[in-house]
Amino acid sequence: MISGYYFITDSTLGRGGANDVKQAIAAKVAAVQYRNKNFSSREMLMEALELRKLCRKTIFLINDRVDIALAVDADGVHLGQDDLPCRAARRLLGKNKIIGLTVHSVEEAIAAQEMGADYIGVSPIFATLTKADAGKSIGIKGLKKIREQVSIPIVAIGGINLSNALEVIQAGADAVCAISAVITKPDVCAEIKKFQALFGIKERTLS
């Protein structure tokens, strides 16, 4: 079960992959997703191997690249709508690996669950500058509709910060990711812990 803060690396922000990941692990994140759009395959492999060593007790996922995930024995992959289809990735990775799939609508969310995705990344919740091709934001209402239709975990991403994260969690997100709101700050671990605390607030309001 993925629950809490979901950490995604960003090669254009922060202090670097390993440094940021160490702080994320210290904050007990739900998972670490390695994403790097600027490296060659060889460079990605080398960095992924380094991060894999750090994430022995933390779920470690590779963005897009099933081949890199296999090469470093990652815990799974996170795929986009234009990446290798979920069922094909499952055949390559096996039944015990985690597969997440980015979705942008209720229809895509339902399809992802039917295809066997272990969780979905709903994106973008709000407008975001971190991912140029993120598409139109779905908002809190869209997130609630998706929550009503699927039972697998939801990771919410896109335009999330400390001022709106609790609303996102209360709308049904099992995990949240706020890339620029975290890794641009001097103390990544401390910023993540602020988001982690919001999940405790949700539980208290539900009890």
Image (spheres, rainbow, N blue to C red):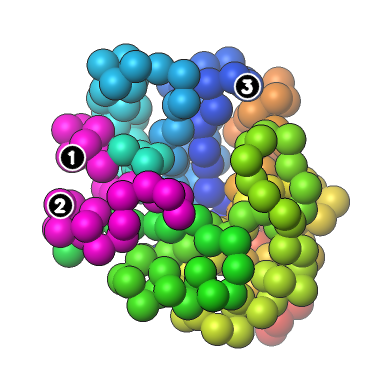
**Percent from the top left, x then y, of residue 77?**
33, 47
Mark toward the start of the polypeptide (3 vs 2)? 3
Instruction: Give the farthest residue toward the front.
Output: 82
- Magenta span of residues: 66-94
Circle 1 residues within 10 Å: few <14, some 14–19, many ≥20: some
Element on which disc 2 rests: helix
Q: Which residue position is annotated with label 3?
A: 13
* Image quadrant where residue 41 sits: top left
**Whether label 3 touches label 2, CB < 8 Å:** no
Q: Amino acid at mark 3?
A: Leu
Circle 2 residues within 10 Å: few <14, some 14–19, many ≥20: few
Mark toward the start of the polypeptide (1 vs 3)? 3
**Whether label 1 touches label 3, CB < 8 Å:** no
Element on which disc 1 rests: helix
Q: Which residue position is annotated with label 1?
A: 70
The residue under the point 24% across, 54% down is 89
Q: Which residue position is annotated with label 2?
A: 92
For marks 2 and 1, give the CA distance.
Answer: 8 Å
Q: Nearer the viewer, residue 7 or 120?
A: 120
Can residue 26 be seen here?
Answer: no
Residue 74 shown left or right of residue 193 in the figure: left
